[in-house]
Amino acid sequence: GENVEQHPSTLSVQEGDSAVIKCTYSDSASNYFPWYKQELGKRPQLIIDIRSNVGEKKDQRIAVTLNKTAKHFSLHITETQPEDSAVYFCAASDASGSARQLTFGSGTQLTVLP
Amino acid sequence: DAGITQSPRYKITETGRQVTLMCHQTWSHSYMFWYRQDLGHGLRLIYYSAAADITDKGEVPDGYVVSRSKTENFPLTLESATRSQTSVYFCASSESGGWRQPQHFGDGTRLSIL
């Protein structure tokens, strides 16, 4: 089955700096890669997702890049703000399969220092 | 995302007891999922369902039972609770069709087993 590794487990940045979270996956058949943000005590919420035939996707201050050959993808947050502080999860899925299961990374606790 | 609701939000029970966590969605999504969230492990899939009366095991199914007699409901039962099942449980749902599979999560159930 799929295995997703996520690094770092914790990340502290100064407000206004950029943050980068990296994930690797094992199953070359995976072709859908979402990122979820989870604030303390809240539900995970989708913030951005990408399909394997796209190398990069941006949405305002967040972007995701995908290197299918190396089987890794990254979340980039620019101009970080205190409200970006949360746990971020990457995930991978074989969208062509019928199961539609997501395999999640173990999460990154991002702290934006004022 | 009020379309998916979990109950109860908090539950304390004793080892050996049976407990059922409820999940209800109003979007008529085909797919529903149960995850458990433990520190250091991220979100791990317990069971999922592709449609009414169709369920399948995820990564950590032992000790859990699910059913799905109606599209909108997907209860999770711990038949004989153990302390290792103390966790936060999240239900999620997603639509069928297409490559994009955003999963919408409920608010979670925090379960403590004494």
Image (cartoon, coloured by chain):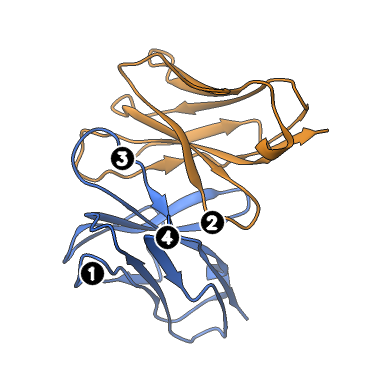
Judging from the image, mark 3 belongs to the subunit labelled B
Of residues B5 and B20, which is closer to you in this image? B5
- Quickly name the residue at label 1: B68
Q: Which chain corresponds to the colour orange?
A: A
- Quickly name the residue at label 4: B2
Residue A78, position in %: x, y?
64, 20
Judging from the image, mark 4 belongs to the subunit labelled B
Would you place residue B77 above or below residue B39 in this image?
below
- Quickly name the residue at label 2: B37
Estimate how packed mark 3 is, as few (under 14), some (14 to 19) or many (20 or more) residues with alpha carbons within 10 Å. many
Residue beneath the point at 20% across and 45% down: B96
Judging from the image, mark 2 belongs to the subunit labelled B
Which tag, 3 or 1, sits closer to the chain's start? 1
- Quickly name the residue at label 3: B101
Q: CA distance from mark 2 to mark 3?
A: 20 Å
Q: CA distance from mark 4 to mark 2?
A: 21 Å
Give left or right: position of B78 versus A5. left
Residue B95, position in %: x, y?
25, 47
Look at label 1 and name its amino acid: Arg
Residue beneath the point at 42% across and 34% down: A34
Q: CA distance from mark 1 to mark 4?
A: 20 Å
